[in-house]
Image: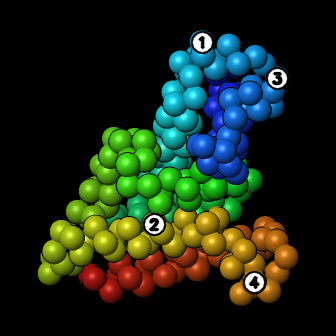
Amino acid sequence: MRERLISVAIQQFGEHGFAGASTRDIAAAADTTMSNITYHFGGKDGLYRAAAEALVTRFWEVAQAAQAAAPQGDPVGELCAVLRAIGAFMLGDEAAPASCFVSREQQNPASPMREFFCRDFLPLSRSHAANIRALDPALTQEEAVATFFYLVSMAISLRSSRMSLCTVMEVDDIEEPMKALLLDRLEAIARMVLEAKR
């Protein structure tokens, strides 16, 4: 029930924001009572925080699994594997409700997501930034981190800019052949950026 409530909460908070989402509606959509929200999360604030943590954890799991499966000792290959995994995740159905929630949170500097990003995503960012800097020692730490951020942002934009993407690609939806093309281009662009530093 806890996971079901989190899943419904992500969708409801993503669509309506914290203020607009109702715990009564969340409980009803999860086919349970409001007392289960209180029992598992202590209330609306706790549910919101749990939803934020679940999203960051899932994003981290996707990136971590790709990095673990990538050929070790090849920093470009490792980062490209992570970017492809994030891109594939963002193109999938699972990312749709998550994207709405995260887009709202990106506008809030005090978002509870910040704590979870610091915990999970910051170490990944530091690791890849160090690899980028090793490829081009002339880069400052800030430049290497910015490079990593922009590359990851390209992968994330496959969902957050989906309407624009469909418009410029002149398609109604992104089917499998288009997904493959987009992921191939994402990797090719990343390799151009990263291998130019060697």
Q: Residue 132 at what x, y percent from top left?
A: 27, 70
The residue lying toward the viewer, choosing from 162 and 125, is 162
Labels 3 and 1: the sequence-earlier one:
3
**Residue marked by disc 2:** 152
Circle nearer the N terminus (3, 4): 3
Q: Nearer the viewer, mark 1 or mark 2?
A: 1
Q: Name the residue under label 3.
A: 31
Q: Residue 15 carries which label?
A: none
Amino acid, disc 4: Thr
- Is 36 positioned to the left or the right of 29 in the image? left
Observer-side mark, 2 or 4, equals 4
The answer to whether residue 188 is left or right of residue 148 is right
Q: Give the residue number, with chain letter if any, for mark 4.
A: 167
Q: 169 or 98, which lies in front?
A: 98
Mark 3 to mark 2 CA distance (whole Å): 36 Å
What residue is shown with label 1?
A: 39
Q: Which of marks 1 and 2 is nearer the N terminus?
A: 1
Q: Residues within 10 Å of mark 2 (few under 14, many from 20)?
A: many
**As shown in the figure, which amino acid type bears the numbered disc 2?**
Val
Q: Nearer the viewer, residue 58 or 188?
A: 58
Query: Within 10 angstroms of label 1, few (less than 14), some, or many (20 or more) residues?
Result: few
Give the CA separation, mark 3 to mark 1.
15 Å
Find the distance from the CA under tag 1 to the CA under tag 2. 37 Å
Depth-wise, is mark 3 or mark 2 nearer the camera?
A: 3
Identify the amino acid type marked 1.
Answer: Tyr
